[in-house]
Image (cartoon, rainbow, N blue to C red):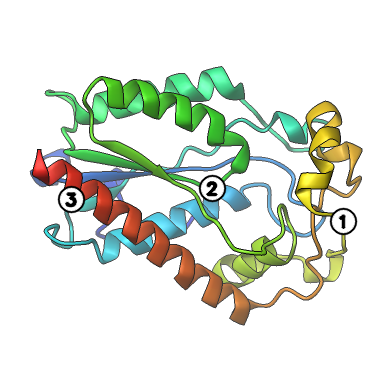
Amino acid sequence: MGPKVVSGTALGGMISTDVPDDAVLLVPVGSTEQHGPHLPLDTDTRIAAAIAHAVALDPPKPLRRGQALVAPALPVGSSGEHAGFPGTLSIGSAALELVLLELVRSATSPGGGPFRAVLIINGHGGNAGPVVSALRTLEGEGRHVSAWAPHVEGGDAHAGFTETSLGLHLFGDLVRTEASEPGALRPVAELMAQLRTGGVAAVAPNGVLGDPTRANAQEGAALFAHLVLSAHGALAALVKAAWRS
């Protein structure tokens, strides 16, 4: 079962002639990588897609419902730091940047979408570099494009309390709570040198950066609402700029 698709917001389920004029496109970008012994490999993709669909269901003005559409999620990103763990897939930074460049160009060019603006919803920290590089090029071409990524003040980094709580809220049937266990508990800033040279395996043999054992769906619901509000604000800012031009 893939990321949840919401009727009325999913571009992939539409007929071409039904795509409205002046629509905006939200592109969830995730990963397929280990998330400890308790979370599915596509955790980042599921979270990014869920946020994108929630935002699209209630888009900022002047958009009407149905004018914000969600592209099929990109399920593989730049996950080299998780190499060595079973199931992890990665296309690397250069390939991801190229995919984003061509996707946004096709969506915003005459004869393509054409969408008035594109918001990338990035669910994986390892994708940040390629996303920023792609944005720089696309903005230089005069396209209305922006990116958003989740940030939780005080949250742990990977497969810990934060992500596991979100998982319990969004796809609880796939979370193996009985297998959850703490991983590396030091702040990521203190681990960064080791992460750069040896990846996640060098600091956390179980692949966890944080402690998922206290995670719960109620906290996940609150976190999700916070992230949706933040992403909604990013789309509102993008729409304001696109409609002003």
Mark 1 Cα shell of 10 Å, populated few (<14), some (14-19), many (≥20) = many
Residue 116 lies in quadrant: top left
- Give SS at disc 1: loop
Separation of disc 2 and disc 1 at Cα?
21 Å
Total numbered labels: 3
Q: Residue at x 55, y 30 (%)?
A: 129
In this rendering, position of residue 245 left or right of residue 127: left
Determine whether 93 is above or below 131 in the image.
above
- For disc 2, the marked residue is 123
Disc number for residue 183: 1
Residue 181 lies in quadrant: bottom right
Separation of disc 2 and disc 3 at Cα?
24 Å
Locate residue 237, reporting x and y percent. Answer: 26, 52
Disc nearest the viewer among 2 and 3: 3
Which residue type carries mark 1? Answer: Gly
- For disc 3, the marked residue is 240
Q: Residue at x 29, y 52 (%)?
A: 235
Q: Residue at x 34, y 27 (%)?
A: 103
